[in-house]
Image (tube, rainbow, N blue to C red):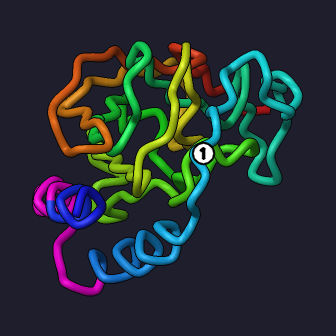
Amino acid sequence: MRTIILILVTVSILAGCAASAHEVAAPVEEARYAERVEEKEALPTAPQDTEPPHKEEIREDGFTLSPSEYAEVWLEAGAADLGAYHVELQYDPAVIVVEAIKTTPAKALSVSPISKPQTFGTGRTGIVGIAPGGVKAQGRVIVARVVFRPIAEGTSRLGVTVRSIKDSAAKDITGTAGIEPQQITVTKQ
């Protein structure tokens, strides 16, 4: 019953993030698969992530993104079971645009983050994630990796705003969100 409520809440959150039934169907199928997982496991926190630190690289197009071409979105919700979240990412679309939103290397949640690709060039992109049955979230939990594509030289500040965080019973819980790094600088070689 809690999983059904969580899925319904997630679908209502997606109404602002997904434009068609097709965009909603895939995450619901992933959620049905994930609800078969019976054991709740503690989510890895930021220091436990296995990826190397941010690294500056020169791209084929000659652009360099510093300190990296990606940023990681994190949530902190105290000791509550994390059931679902909806955050909004902000960036300067004159300098960078979103190329992809991926799961983290540690796969903190059982379902990949959901977003609407049509918003990737707008400067504001919603990101939704669900964890059917909930998972223990202690400390900062990295929930998404955002890969950026350069548009022009300059610096873009990055921000993230919490729209909602739900526990495993689909009840609102308080929490904070952030992003690392907090800005990306683009230069051309």
Relative image position of residue 35 (x, y in whole percent)? 46, 67
Tally the numbered discs: 1
Q: Choose top left, top right, bottom left or bottom right for residue 185.
A: top right
Q: Choose top left, top right, bottom left or bottom right for residue 5.
A: bottom left
The residue that appears at 51% across and 27% down in the rendered structure is 137
Q: Nearer the viewer, residue 106 or 33?
A: 33
The residue that appears at 40% across and 32% down in the rendered structure is 81
Q: Nearer the viewer, residue 126 or 148?
A: 126
The residue that appears at 51% across and 60% down in the rendered structure is 111
Specify whether 116 is left or right of 21: right
Q: Nearer the viewer, residue 47 or 52?
A: 47
Kindly identify which residue carries mark 1.
Answer: 147
Give the position of the C terminus as an image quadrant.
top right
Relative image position of residue 97 (x, y in whole percent)? 45, 45
Q: Is residue 6 visible?
A: yes
Q: How crowded is the residue under tag 1: few (<14 C-alpha within 10 Å), some, or many (20+)?
A: some
Answer above or below: position of 23 versus 167.
Answer: below
Specify whether 68 is left or right of 164: right
The residue that appears at 52% across and 59% down in the rendered structure is 112
Specify whether 47 is left or right of 141: right
SS type, badge 1: strand
**Which span is picked out in magenta?**
9-22
Relative image position of residue 118 (x, y in whole percent)? 29, 64
Q: Give the farthest residue toward the bottom.
A: 22
Q: Nearer the viewer, residue 67 or 6?
A: 6
Q: Is residue 123 visible?
A: no
Relative image position of residue 22 (x, y in whole percent)? 28, 86
Q: Is residue 10 magenta?
A: yes
Q: Is residue 144 magenta?
A: no
Give the amino acid at mark 1.
Val
Give the position of the N terminus as an image quadrant.
bottom left
Q: Choose top left, top right, bottom left or bottom right for residue 67.
A: top right
